[in-house]
Image (cartoon, rainbow, N blue to C red):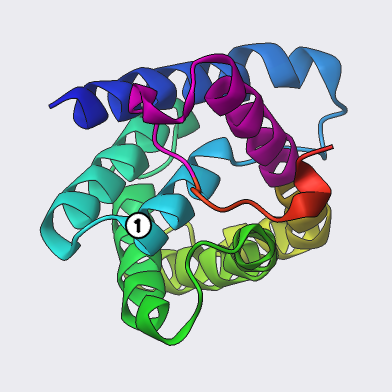
Amino acid sequence: MKRIAYFLLLSFFLIFLQVSVLPRLLPDYFKPDLLLILALYLGLTATWLRGGLFCWYLGCLEDTFAGNDFGLFGIAFLIIFLAVRAGASRFNTESSALLLVLTFFATFFKGAVLISLLVLFSEAGRQWPVILSCLLPEAVLNTFCALLLLRFSLLLRRRFARGAGIPGLSHLDRRYES
């Protein structure tokens, strides 16, 4: 129950940063997707049911602020979670480098899923050029934000001790511990 409450608070904090703080600090064409990073983390660590439901919730939370067709990001985040969860058994899920690489490539995968869903289910199917033009800057910015979140997670774990129940990668690479 503690873990669920932690993720709920973290998702509210990340969506606040994503829609209120970062747009004031960054140019219009730089839009990080912080909830995608959380969805990827859940794909690496959570169970199928709990993680799937929470990723669908994250997508619906992003839908609330996106102004697009409701459910679009919910389905996209659920598909991304299922893809990551299916491949998680083949990789070392405790590797922080895996989260960074996944963040970069999952941004492109999210763009492909969004374009596919918009073409299939929306009458405004001409949004795909806008999505394509923003993918590379968003992928780089998402990877940078994932790196910052890894460092912040390590700082919290050091500050509040390892046994405090703060979810995170238990064995971060040494290069992030300096």
In magenta segment, residue 165: yes
Farthest residue toward the bottom? Answer: 90
Q: Foreground residue, 75 or 102?
A: 102
What stretch of residues is rendered in magenta? 145-168
Q: Nearer the viewer, residue 127 or 97?
A: 97
Residue 50 location (% of width, % of height): 15, 50
Local crowd size for mark 1, using a 10 Å CA cut-off: few (<14), some (14–19), many (≥20): some
Along the viewing direction, whichever of 2 and 62 lies nearer the viewer? 2
Residue 171 higher or lower than 111, as above or below = above
Specify whether 151 is left or right of 140: left
Chief secondary structure of the magenta span? Answer: helix
The residue beneath circle 1 is 45
Residue at left offset 35%, top offset 17% = 9
Q: Position of residue 90 (x, y in %)?
A: 43, 87
Residue at figure coordinates x 85%, y 25% from the top left: 26
Q: Quadrant of the N terminus?
A: top left
At a point 58% along the width and 66% down the height, the residue shown is 106
